Image (cartoon, coloured by chain):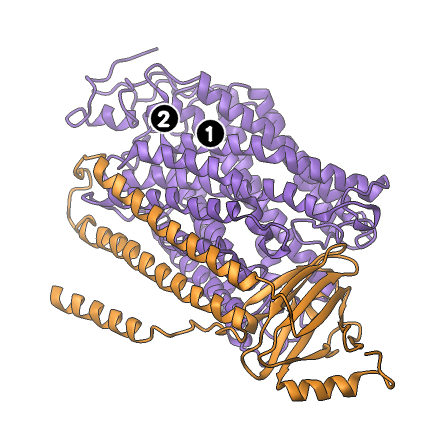
Chain colours: A purple, B orange
Amino acid sequence: MSLTTERRHPVPSPADRPHGGPVAWLTTTDHKKIGLLYCVTAFTFFLIGGALAGAMRAELAGTGNQLVGPQAYNTLFTVHGIIMIFLFVAPFGVGLANYLVPLQIGAPDMAFPRLNAMSYWFFVGGGVLVLLSSFATDAGGVATGWYLYPPLSGPRYSPGVGPDLLILGLALIAISTLMSGVNVITTTFLMRAPGMTMWRLPLFTWNAVVTALLGLVAFPPAMAAFVLLLFDRRLGGQAFDPLGGGDPIVYQHLFWFLGHPEVYILILPFFGVITEIIPVCSRKRLFGYTGFVLATLAIGALSTGVWAHHMFTTGVVDNPFFSAMSFAIAVPTGVKFFNWIGTMWGGRLSFRVSMLFSIGFLLNFLIGGVTGVMLASPPLDFQLSDSYFLVSHFHYTIMGGSVFGIFAAIYFWWPKAFGYRLSERLGRGVFAFLFIGFNLTFWPQFVVGLRGMPRRIVDYAPGLGWETPNLVSSLGVVVLSLGVLVFLVDVVTARRRRTPAGDDPWGGHSLEWATTSPPPEHNFTALPRIRSERPAFDMRHPEVSPSSPPMERS
Amino acid sequence: MRRAWTGRLAAVAFVAASSCSSSFGMPRGSTEQGKDIFDLWQIFFWAGIGVAAIVYGLIGWSLLRYRRRRNEDETLLGRQFHANVPLEIIYTAIPVVIVIVLFVLSYRTERTASSLSASPDVTLRAEAFSWGWRFGFPDQGVEVVSQPSAEGVPGPEILLPLGETTRIELTSNDVIHAFWVPDFLYKRDALPGRINRFDVTPTDLGTFHGVCSEFCGLHHAYMTFTVRVVSPAAFDAWIASEAPAGGLA
């Protein structure tokens, strides 16, 4: 009989109590608490960013200025982008990595627990500065678009203090990303349990490692660009000012060298999430593990060579290299799709809420991928760049993909983190509202983009065929909002009901399912033998596992 | 029941194939360059639909065929195979072939659509500023300057001659803007300190809506313009009426 399923520490240490006081939370260096802090903070930013999006869609529901003027609208979309990218999706991925990587590799904590706490608090500081840059400046909030293109973001055209605060906020976020990246990589390379070779790492951990590597590669050049921009703005520099001999195109190169790996920083952790969920809910082993790992590494490598496809319309990048790389990155992504299908093939699929969100991820992300191939083609990009088609494309990847992955992760690992379940019934409602609402919101944006509607406009003229799709899109946001509301209701009622989940409610594969729910402070009192990429499964199913019966380590 | 399902699939395929000339709601390109690009669009649309149909089909089949049946024991396992190297090589190779073909086609179209004529018939200087446009035909001494853009202010209108090649020299006076006529399926950025050159050869008479597509600040949304394509004779007449008395040309 398995030794690890029984609770070995019925009395948790004080710092490990589920209701540890606020001081315990604020001073914690425990990777699980930091992971949860990341996730909760990021989700709060999701609600803020979502409210901003709601205001934008209300404004665009019809022609004319109904709700906000151009100045406020320009701030809305700038801050919406910054929040969703840097303060919600990316840090939620970091939070999951914090929580899961040590558990999945059988380690007691991250390699540098205090650095870990510091990276969280830098992220919070960056988030506060971003909020200040948008809502709390007397000279108007930052209104430059999330990519802060000079000369518009320079001192002449954006004199307020908003962009300065935003740059400082992004600097803190970048430092936080570097610190957490170093931590995830060191932890994975040095702290794996005996038997946990790199080729047995769970796919979520692999994706977390590649994400961390991308952060280390991509953020420093962008930091350089931001600092030069700050010099231009406050110290009389002219790095990007054409009147002083500077070149705004240089900024674009540096920025997109961050910007494109960043979109893979946003998606890879959630590729990892659904790659954990689909085998468990299919009652099967992952299909094509080696292919998955190689595809993930290929995506990481290729993503650093595609940045100038954001600059095709500048007329400055006349090199087919960037187009070729952008096409090429579709291949490893395609391989992953077939591997996910191969994993479901021949399985016994149970449509738990986490599985529903994973399937939603596949259906939405495929559209994002196919339209992404269109954007890799320069002649097509001449129509699509800066249009609503582009807006819809990246929402199909980041929202239809990553955000669905986030909800999948929440429903999948919630019982592990808290010891009780969310409601499957309410969860199916959340999924239905989000899936329908998402497609209702963003599909019309493909249509209106092809009809010539540019992004980032507060208003549009009637008679161009843009009214109906915009109205439908705005109504879709109502459905989306209902989904988020039902989710919050689910969280509140589940916290009250506290239906015990047991240590392994789904028949999980990776090591986190071999410890208690929630795990003790040091994660494991005993580890099963690790003879494949799914040690928890092997422990419970010796009849199909490659290893001999489990053995205790203590 | 199986037959009804395949029959429906065939019907869908037939409808899709018979509407092969569909533009999917997008403009078909009202210039020679745009028509080249539109041909490429068709290829991408059908390739995309084909790929999506195959992948959605496989996903749908897995979900239906391999779902856990009602009353089935939850702890039953699926078949525990985990790799099939030849299959994996095949489904890596097929996307490689697809993207190579699409890349080559894109590269060729980009060469033709962005190639510059040795002797354009008309030269249009387009200078973007915050927030409006200054359009000039330097050879004819004609200039059209917009009102400062704002809500309710109509954008400027310029005329282009049908069937003649117009060289557009695009630049910006301050921040980055972009010149986009959706019906031409083409846009270019207007960069301060640089001149972007491209040719348009209109093939359709009509009035076409143009916008600034690179976010440029407060009144970005209102920085619109209109391009009216007319016969060469009408174009000459318009030039003559717009040219300053005594003419520079």
Q: Which mark is residue A209?
A: 1
Which residue type does callout 2 highlight? Leu
Q: CA distance from mark 1 to mark 2?
A: 10 Å
Question: How far across and down, in percent of the image, does residue A259 sit?
Answer: 58, 44
Question: How far across and down, in percent of the image, does residue A339 sit?
Answer: 29, 42
Q: Residue at x 51, y 18 (%)?
A: A111
Quarter residue B60 falls in: bottom left
As drawn, A109 above or below A173: above
Q: Give the camera-side residue of A424 and B135.
A: B135
Please give the residue where the numbered disc 2 appears in the rendered image.
Answer: A201
Packing grade of label 2 (10 A; few <14, some 14-19, many >=20) is many
Badges 1 and 2: C-beta atoms under 8 Å apart?
A: yes
Residue A418 in view: no
Quarter residue B115 falls in: bottom right
Left or right: residue A167 versus residue B182 is right
Query: Circle 1 marks a residue in which chain?
Result: A
Quarter of the picture containing the N terminus of chain A is top left
Q: At numbered mark 1, what does the secondary structure look like: helix, strand or loop?
A: helix
Left or right: residue A273 versus residue A144 is left
Q: At numbered mark 2, what does the secondary structure look like: helix, strand or loop?
A: loop
As drawn, B81 above or below A161: above
Q: Residue at x 33, y 29 (%)?
A: A510
Q: Give the camera-side residue of B176 and A36.
A: B176
Question: How far across and down, in percent of the image, does residue A22 sit?
Answer: 60, 30
Q: Give the camera-side residue of A275 and B37.
A: B37
Q: Residue at x 78, y 42 (%)?
A: A239
